[in-house]
Image (cartoon, grey):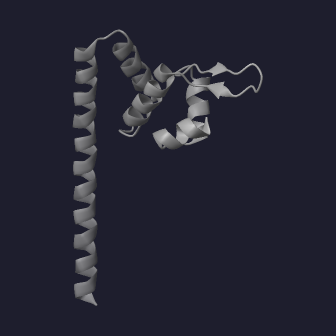
Amino acid sequence: MGEVAKEAKVSTSAIRHWEKESLVHPQRNLDSGFRQFDIEDIRKIFIIRTVQRTVFSLEIVREVLKEIENNKITQTREIASHALDQVNVILFKQIKGIAACDYLLKTIDEEE
């Protein structure tokens, strides 16, 4: 698991959580008990990581994985496009907040 986590740049606890949520289904090595990830699990881990970085819930992650598994690329593209729109709204609000804080600091500095 550590190798997969390192390659995907996620924590092992995140992968354990995704396994608990039935998003990935690694096999167990009968001798060692270690998880064995096949290429499909690794692909899902990269997809989950990417989708979650846009601040989405596990329900959205499940939806994206389902659409990809069913080769519904158009729906997956729509989800990604909607995600991008939401991220842009959040970023715009953050930029406005930064500008307001900057203005406040300049105003305070002028009064000193």
Q: Compared to 10, does 34 lie above or below?
A: above
Q: Locate residue 86, reporting x and y percent.
A: 26, 37
> Which residue is drawn at the image coordinates 31% and 11% (left, top)?
71
Please identify the quadrant where the C terminus is shown: bottom left
Q: Locate residue 108, reporting x and y percent.
A: 28, 81
Residue that protrudes farthest toward the bottom in the picture = 112
> Which residue is drawn at the image coordinates 28% and 76% (left, top)?
105
Q: Quadrant of residue 49?
A: top left
Residue that protrudes farthest toward the right in the picture = 31
Q: Quadrant of residue 4?
A: top right
Q: Is residue 47 left or right of residue 103?
A: right
Q: Locate residue 13, reporting x and y percent.
A: 61, 38
Q: Nearer the viewer, residue 38 or 81?
A: 38
- State whether residue 28 appears in this view: yes
Residue that protrudes farthest toward the top in the picture = 70
Please identify the quadrant where the N terminus is shown: top right
Q: Quadrant of residue 19?
A: top right
Q: Is residue 45 left or right of residue 53?
A: right
> Which residue is drawn at the image coordinates 22% and 35% (left, top)?
85
Q: Compared to 66, does 37 lie above or below?
A: below
Q: Locate residue 15, reporting x and y percent.
A: 57, 33
Q: Nearer the viewer, residue 20 or 98?
A: 20
Q: Compared to 3, does 37 lie above or below?
A: above
> Which residue is drawn at the image coordinates 43% and 26% (left, top)?
43
- Count of numbered labels shown in the rendering: 0
Q: Compared to 93, does 107 lie above or below?
A: below
- State whether residue 10 appears in this view: no
